[in-house]
Image: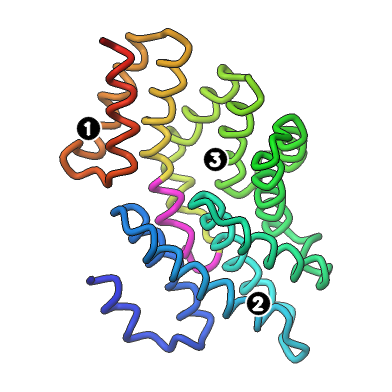
Amino acid sequence: SEAVDIYSTIDQDSLRGLSALLPLATSRWATGDVAGAMQALTATVDRSLSIVEGDATSHAEGLDAAYVMTVAALLAQRLGDQRQATRAMKAMESKGRYLDEAPINGLYAVLRSNQLLDRGESARAVSLLEEVANGNEPFQVRVALLEAYAASGQPDQALNQARWVSENRGKAYAEQGCGWCQQPLNVYDTTLSRLRAAELLAESGHADEAQAELRRFDAAWASDRLPPQLRRRRTAVLATFN
């Protein structure tokens, strides 16, 4: 509610207003309001597209809008909606000038890799992400690489990425992006990666290590305050210890 009140005070037709939609969507998702999150994400992609595709749009403005659009689309993918990614990718492909620039090229790779994973092409997803993981990649490349490794049957590599994400909280905060509009998602992932590491360890039969990671997750996010989707995942990890 506070996030909505803050957002209502911003010019929603400005890039600043557009950027404000991403933290709003992330906070809704993190508290279990998936429908509300998707509403904000769809609006973000809609408005970003009008800027990216606009003939009168300056390069700098288009680049900022493309950044917002790609982050919104990749979060939509994580909520199970590939449509926003398809729209965003087509727009950027038609305006190819954005695809050669960092960090847009890295975020585009995340969108593409998530589509490949959705089709079961995990090896191609891994290869695509490894190409852009050069040390200066967007934080979300590492988050996507975690899932690509897990899907391709490389649990040790996935665990390495989960630990990198959780241990690089400073980078999650500091990455500037679209005026730090992606910061809430990055920071959320540093905590969520603890639960993901516990899942990977439990699946590999490393119960003691899984319990240790779960304790770290619980220390960061009290179990009685978890949204339903994370409570179910935590319960599933606990069930492997019994």
User: Do the residues bearing badges 2 and 3 touch, measured as CB atoms within 8 Å?
Assistant: no
Where is mark 1, residue-wise? Answer: 219
Identity of the residue drawn at 73% across and 62% down:
89
Identity of the residue drawn at 28% across and 20% down:
238
User: Residue 15: x percent and y percent?
Assistant: 53, 81
Where is mark 3, residue-wise? Answer: 143
Q: SS class of the residue under badge 3?
A: helix
- Disc 1 to disc 2, how far (Cα)? 40 Å
Q: Residue furthest left?
A: 224
Looking at the picture, tell me which residue is in the foreground, 230 or 189.
Answer: 230
The boundaries of the magenta stretch are: 178-188
Q: Is residue 180 magenta?
A: yes
Identity of the residue drawn at 54% across and 40% down:
143
Left or right: 82 as drawn, with respect to 234: right
Q: SS class of the residue under badge 2?
A: helix
Q: SS class of the residue under badge 1?
A: helix
User: Residue 70: x percent and y percent?
Assistant: 62, 62
Kind of residue at badge 1: Ala
Identity of the residue drawn at 65% across and 60% down:
85
Q: Quadrant of the N terminus?
A: bottom left
